[in-house]
Amino acid sequence: MKLQIAAWQPGVLAAFGSAFLFGAGTPLAKWLLGQMSPWMLAGLLYLGSGLGLSIYRGLKGAARPRLNPGEMRWLFAAVLCGGGIAPVLLLFGLSALPASHAALLLNAEAVLTALLAWGLFKENVDKRIAIGMAAIVAGALLLSWPTNEATASPSLASLWPAFAVLLACFFWALDNNFTRKVALTDASWIACVKGMVAGTSNLLLAFMLGAPLPGAFKLSAALGVGFVAYGVSLTLFVVALRHLGASRAGAYFSTAPFVGALFSVIFLAEPLTWQLIAAAFLMALGIWLHLTEHHAHAHPHSVLEHEHLHAHNDEHHLHPHEPAMEGTHSHRHRHEPMNHSHAHYPDAHHRHDH
């Protein structure tokens, strides 16, 4: 029963959807990478994310959300870390590292996201969640481990390039935790802003390195893949952050490399390797441990005032309305202090100490 409840939790579905779209876009990005420079492609993917979501929001008539000064600071910090600083550090690292070694190091993002969430932002963690996180990350590491004997024993000429990639992962981990602070805001708007900033910064880097713009077909393909695999995926990831917290959302998203590898086997006729089978087992174990989590205890709620989409279908949102409102709606509302006990995730309404 617990497994069924957890599996259909909106944040879990959003996290898996985010990982699926990002992972499914990997084979397409790999094909496009043969047509243009890595930094041009990165810029176009991010820009496709921002432009696509801008068009979607325009057609939908979505209004720009209202953020208070504190929320704006968190969003600015997230965009600066994830869209500005991290890509530059990754560029420096990749300039002196084999791609296979960099792929291994990039798996540190999920680990650092969880460590920051648990240590700095005080998300609750227990042995079950920690073991599940370790199993999922181990599966991702196994998938990206180089199989070529010539590259199986990396020898780095310098530690600085590797450190730069790890530092990029650290800033992306900060980005994930900062974004969690504003995850109640319109997810498509957050993803749109981050896509536009990251796309612009990566394109500037590409042009600085002398990369030319691709032809119209390849340009359109990159923008389209970026909209789905980055824009829609990031929107779903923000929803997952809203419901699950940074560490759990990051753990589920770490299954994206498996999705990408599976699609490569199915559509690109790549061989089915023992690494893929072993990674599937490790990730399935980690996901099962997370899905069957049952975290319930008596906890306090202090006074909280904020604005987000909500419905009056739980005891956290039973405030009165004048005039009466039904269904999902958004307005600034106040949570009165209370003490109660129920199963919960470290979402925006459950950031208490343990």
Image (tube, rainbow, N blue to C red):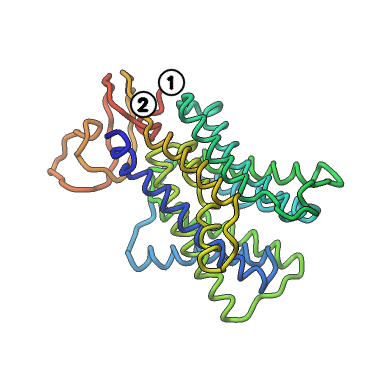
In the displayed structure, 265 sits above or below 280; it is: below
User: How far from the left and from the top, in percent, is residue 133?
Assistant: 52, 35
The spot of residue 287 in percent (x, y) is: 44, 40
Vertical arrangement, residue 222 with respect to residue 87, above or below: below
Question: SS for tag 2?
Answer: loop
Please state which of residues 66 and 162 is positioned toward the viewer in this rendering. Answer: 162
Rendered-image quadrant of the N terminus: top left
> Do tag 2 and tag 1 residues touch (Cβ < 8 Å)?
no
Instruction: Check disc 2: other Cα within 10 Å, few if <14, some if 14-19, many if 20+.
Output: few
Residue receiving disc 1: 353
Crowding at label 1, few (<14), some or many (≥20) Cα neighbours within 10 Å?
few
Identify the residue shown where x is 65% and y is 47%: 106
Q: Earlier in the sequence, mark 2 or mark 1?
A: 2
Q: Name the residue under label 2.
A: 295
Amino acid type at image mark 1: Asp
Res. 263 visible in picture: yes
Report x, y in % for residue 167.
69, 41
Residue found at x 35% / y 57%: 63
Q: Which of the two marks, 2 or 1, is nearer to us in this view?
A: 2
Q: Position of residue 38 (x, y in %)?
A: 68, 64
Q: Is residue 199 left or right of residue 316?
A: right
Q: Which residue is drawn at 54% across and 37% down?
A: 135
- Between the C-alphas of marks 2 and 1, the distance is 13 Å
Secondary structure, mark 1, is loop
Kind of residue indicated by mark 2: His
Residue drawn at x 52%, y 38% is 177
Q: How many marks do you count on the picture?
A: 2
Up/down of 45 relative to 285, above or below: below
Q: In which quarter of the image is the C terminus?
A: top left
Image check: 52 left or right of 76? left
Q: Is residue 123 left or right of residue 201?
A: left
